[in-house]
Amino acid sequence: MRYIKELREGENVVEHYLCKSRQVLKSRAGKSYLSLKLQDKTGTVDAKVWDMSNDIKSFEENDFIKIDANVIVYQNDLQLNVKKIRRSMEGEYDPMDYIPCSEKNIDSMYQELLGYIRTIKSPYIKKLLEIIFLKHPVVSKRFKTHSAAKNIHHGYMGGLVEHTLSVTQICDFVAPRYKFVDRDILIASAMLHDVGKVLELSEFPVNDYTDDGQLLGHLIIGAEMIKDAAAQIEGFPKQLESLLKHCMLSHHGEYEYGSPKLPKTIEAFILHCADNLDAKTKVIEEMLENDSTQGSWAGYQKMLQRNIRKSDYE
């Protein structure tokens, strides 16, 4: 198996990949071409089919395909110039080679995350967390192995629990360092902030937006989970429910980033900062890990809108 992470400029590659996306576009000259995104467990790569000849056999998104392509560099990123494509035949590939997975121990991370429930003092919040993480028909089965994103950060199997644990650890570190912080609300909100992604994104190998993901999004889905769980707990304080839902709905921090509300409590603000820190730092980490450029600069990071330098020196 020739993994995407191993590809280098100037090489020819004949290999099987998962076709994550397929678009028919037109060049400036008006000629049709295919724009593809191919995936294996080490990452994704853009691919272009400029010559729609008989060597390009019929295939669809989420098909496994065999390609013959040249590896080039375009705008500092690797790209494949594809000459031949056909659908892969059963037995020619191992599906597990195409599912990206956390390098960390998923079971250990999940048990550590669930361990935070025992540290919660409020009986209402503890019960709510138990209902969602241990009894919800989807969360209890998918959370451990789900991704945290389609392709931005932690977009791999186990990415959701890896990101959630990291955000929860950051919040646990910050909580005692400032006055007026309700640790129970902060830790619970950190554990729950992306729980809606189990319904926003489909399972691997597709890992794409569901109808509810497109129509509602994980912030609304997560707030509904909190509401439904609270309704199962006798005497659950209405104001506590609102405070937890506010953290969920505001954790993206700004209207332009999809938050229907700005953080208006100290817990919501800390959660936003912790989530932002882990997500954006992971983006840089993944860029440096996949970097194949020479010199000290890894190139331009589109989401962060800046060039990223490696921390080497003489």
Image (spheres, rainbow, N blue to C red):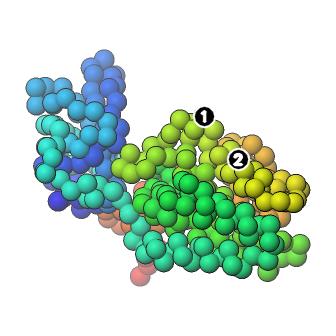
Residue 304 is left or right of residue 255, and the answer is: left
For the residues labelled 2 and 1, the Cα–Cα distance comes to 14 Å
Mark 1 crowd level (few <14, some 14–19, many ≥20, 10 Å Cα): few
Say if 136 sits above or below 150 in the image. below
Residue 60 percent location from the top left of the image: 28, 33
Mark toward the start of the polypeptide (2 vs 1): 1
Of 227 and 294, the residue lying toward us: 227
Of 116 and 154, the residue lying toward us: 116
Q: Which quarter of the figure is the N terminus placed in?
A: bottom left
Q: Is residue 47 visible?
A: no
Residue 283 is left or right of residue 39, and the answer is: right
Q: For mark 2, what is the residue? A: 224
Q: Residue at x 21, y 56 (%)?
A: 94
Asked which quadrant contains residue 213, the reply is top right
Front of the two marks 2 and 1: 2
Mark 2 crowd level (few <14, some 14–19, many ≥20, 10 Å Cα): some
Residue 28 percent location from the top left of the image: 34, 22
Q: Residue at x 32, y 26 (%)?
A: 24
- The mark total stands at 2
Residue at the left extreme, as displayed = 54
Tag of residue 215 = 1
Q: Is disc 1 placed on a helix, strand or loop?
A: helix
Q: Is disc 2 placed on a helix, strand or loop?
A: helix
Q: Residue at x 65, y 46 (%)?
A: 221
Of 137 and 91, the residue lying toward us: 137
| Residue type for callout 2 | Glu
Residue 9 percent location from the top left of the image: 22, 54
Q: Is residue 188 visible?
A: yes
Residue 219 percent location from the top left of the image: 67, 48
| Residue type for callout 1 | Leu
Q: Which quarter of the figure is the C terminus placed in?
A: bottom left
Residue at the top extreme, as displayed = 30
